Image (cartoon, rainbow, N blue to C red):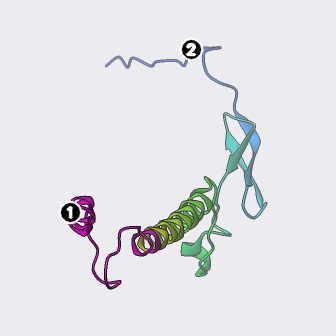
Amino acid sequence: MVYNLQVMKKEIHPKYHKDANIRCMSCGTEYEIGSTKESYSVAICSKCHPFYTGEQVIIDTANKISTFKERQSKTEELKKRMADIEKKREERKKQKVGVIGSDDKRLSLKDLLKAKSAKK
């Protein structure tokens, strides 16, 4: 029986580093492992991950929370401005020229012209 032993080709594989560093961006912990890259950086590790620690920590790496809060504040400002605009519109309606008789009775331009021609 003949075995076909394949030998690894030389100089096509990446260099292996026995003491590669991994650094956690959130807590700063560093680990040494074997890898083909010299160093890695990760967003969260086992020392600061809520699953392992049992504590809830919010890490906003992509600024999603701050972006959401900013959009929410802009929406609130817009709602306030729209409410102010509506108040001003209502005030303008109350101050419209063309009130004949009581304040509750508003007449159209056509009715005003009829009333004016009737007075003459």
Q: Nearer the viewer, residue 116 or 94?
A: 116
Q: Nearer the viewer, residue 90 or 7?
A: 90
Residue extending farthest front: 120
- What residue lies at 20% left-to-right and 63% top-to-bottom? 114
- What residue lies at 69% left-to-right and 35% top-to-bottom? 37
Magenta stretch bounds: 91-120
Q: Amino acid at mark 2?
A: Lys
Q: Position of residue 99 (x, y in %)?
A: 35, 74
Q: Position of residue 3 (x, y in %)?
A: 37, 20
Can you tell which quarter of the image residue 46 is in?
bottom right
Q: Nearer the viewer, residue 95 or 116?
A: 116
Q: Which residue is mark 1?
A: 114
Query: Mark on residue 73?
Result: none
Q: Position of residue 68 (x, y in %)?
A: 54, 61
Q: Tell me the quarter of the image containing the C terminus.
A: bottom left
**Which one is closest to the eye, mark 2 or mark 1?**
1
| Spatial CA span between label 2 and label 1 | 103 Å
Label 2 or label 1, whichever comes before in sequence order: 2
Q: Which residue is mark 2?
A: 9
Q: Nearer the viewer, residue 77 or 50?
A: 77
